């Protein structure tokens, strides 16, 4: 894995249940996260993990991949976690394989600290010096898009990617509203150091995705989230 993993943190004025629902349901997840166009889960495994396929569409090329995830909802302090691994064989994808987590931390005033840390093996070699900051920015922008929605603002669809140019809109999503490193830490730290133990237990997913995820029927089973 690269030496610079990605970290994003935001505080959402919503309870953990609401943040969990908006991020663990694939149909809701793709509404706010610009890193994914479609996520289709498989039935859960006996250990609670779930496999899924994903698609990231663009005007030039659609990237297909697979993943496996697992969520943990019951902790004494109310914190929840979700871990995943993902992979693709698409030679045009900037990511080959990756792993990461989401953490949901309730605050004393009823809000939720929503955190992700993830890392990946680059598919573009030296060009990752450009890709990695862009992926970090896209994650942070998406987190603020989610926050606006859950705090009673506009639905995610009201803020397409092009809205970043609407500089006169003070209510637009902005990556700068998020933290890109833990308090007292740096962006270049190992942000998987505090990943949940469930991440280490996940099997590596197959890198071969189905030819067309859109050809499959819609599923209602929830994966453990995609970081």
Image: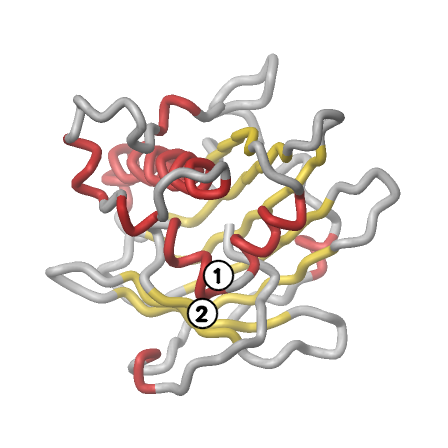
* Mark 1 and mark 2: Cα distance apart in space: 6 Å
Question: In this rendering, is residue 221 above or below 55?
Answer: below
Res 44 → quadrant: bottom right
Mark 1 secondary-structure assignment: strand
Q: Residues within 10 Å of mark 1 (few under 14, many from 20)?
A: many
Question: In this rendering, is residue 31 above or below 80?
Answer: below
Task: Identify residue for label 1.
Answer: 86
Q: In the displayed image of the protein, which residue is found farthest to the top?
A: 184
Decide which of 159, 129 is in the foreground and name it.
159
Q: In the displayed image of the protein, which residue is found farthest to the left?
A: 60
- The image's mark for residue 48 is none
Decide which of 73, 59 is in the foreground and name it.
73
Percent position of residue 216, x then y: 38, 86
Percent position of residue 24, x then y: 56, 58
User: From the viewer's perspective, is 32 left or right of 225?
Assistant: left
Q: Residues within 10 Å of mark 2 (few under 14, many from 20)?
A: many
Percent position of residue 195, x then y: 67, 42
Mark 2 secondary-structure assignment: strand
Percent position of residue 157, x then y: 29, 51
Report the residue at 66% width, 44% height from top: 16
Task: Identify residue for label 2.
Answer: 66
Query: Which numbered disc, 1 or 2, marks the residue that appears first in the sequence?
Result: 2
Decide which of 112, 150 is in the foreground and name it.
150
Q: In the displayed image of the protein, which residue is found farthest to the right?
A: 76
CB atoms of marks 1 and 2 within 8 Å: yes
């Amino acid at each position: 894995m690269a030496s610079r993993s990605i970290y994003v943190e935001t505080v959402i004025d919503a309870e953990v249940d609401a943040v969990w629902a908006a991020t663990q349901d694939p149909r809701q997840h793709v509404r706010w996260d610009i890193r994914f166009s479609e996520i289709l889960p498989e039935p859960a495994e006996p250990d609670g993990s779930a496999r899924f396929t994903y698609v990231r569409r663009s005007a030039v090329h659609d990237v297909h991949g697979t993943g496996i995830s697992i969520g943990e909802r019951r902790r004494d302090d109310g914190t929840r976690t979700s871990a995943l691994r993902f992979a693709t064989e698409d030679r045009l994808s900037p990511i080959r394989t990756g792993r990461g987590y989401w953490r949901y931390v309730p605050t004393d005033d009823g809000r939720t600290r929503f955190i992700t840390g993830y890392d990946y093996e680059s598919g573009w070699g030296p060009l990752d010096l450009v890709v990695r900051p862009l992926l970090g920015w896209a994650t942070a922008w998406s987190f603020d898009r989610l926050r606006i929605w859950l705090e009673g603002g506009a639905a995610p669809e009201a803020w397409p990617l092009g809205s970043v140019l609407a500089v006169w809109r003070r209510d637009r999503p902005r990556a700068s509203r998020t933290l890109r490193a833990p308090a007292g830490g740096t962006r270049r730290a190992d942000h998987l150091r505090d990943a949940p133990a469930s991440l280490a237990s996940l099997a590596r997913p197959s890198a071969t995705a189905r030819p067309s995820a859109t050809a499959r029927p819609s599923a209602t089973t929830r994966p453990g989230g995609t970081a």
